[in-house]
Amino acid sequence: MNELENVFKSKFPNKIDHFKKFIQELKFELVEMKIENYNKYPKIRDIDDLPLLACAIETKVNVLVTGDKDFDGVIIETPKILNPGKYIEEYIKKPMLGDDM
């Protein structure tokens, strides 16, 4: 969570209030775990991101939301890996009046 907030502050310093509101409204659970053997997980471009990917797989999360381009080449069924824009489009954005016509 600290890394997420720090990255958001560096990229969007004037919108930190939006970030905090988003986090408050988001349903999530923080889980801490230790992985002993990373060899059974998919390869990822940045090896430093492998612990996050492994934890997401082990905890059986449905969606991993990341803006990190190193996750772009990872091909797995679960979790679904989405960038923030795609997540909003698929899970948050409500149809506008008349969109169902």
Image (cartoon, rainbow, N blue to C red):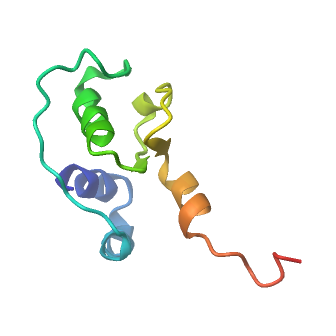
Q: Is residue 3 above or below residue 21?
A: above
Camera-side residue: 86 or 4? 86
Residue at image point 37% right, 53% down: 11
Q: Position of residue 100 (x, y in %)?
A: 82, 76
Q: Position of residue 17 (x, y in %)?
A: 33, 75
Q: Is residue 15 above or below residue 36?
A: below
**In the displayed structure, does residue 42 sit left or right of residue 88?**
left
Residue at image point 38% right, 21% down: 42
Residue at image point 46% right, 27% down: 74
Residue furthest out toward the top: 39
Can you say which quadrant of the picture contains the C terminus?
Answer: bottom right
Residue furthest out toward the right: 101
Residue at image point 14% right, 30% down: 35
Can you say which quadrant of the picture contains the N terminus?
Answer: bottom left
Q: Position of residue 63 (x, y in %)?
A: 43, 50
Question: Number of labelled discs?
Answer: 0
**In the displayed structure, does residue 28 sit left or right of residue 35?**
right
Q: Is residue 52 above or below residue 41?
A: below
Camera-side residue: 12 or 42? 42
The image quarter in which residue 19 lies:
bottom left
Q: Position of residue 6 (x, y in %)?
A: 23, 54
Residue furthest out toward the bottom: 97
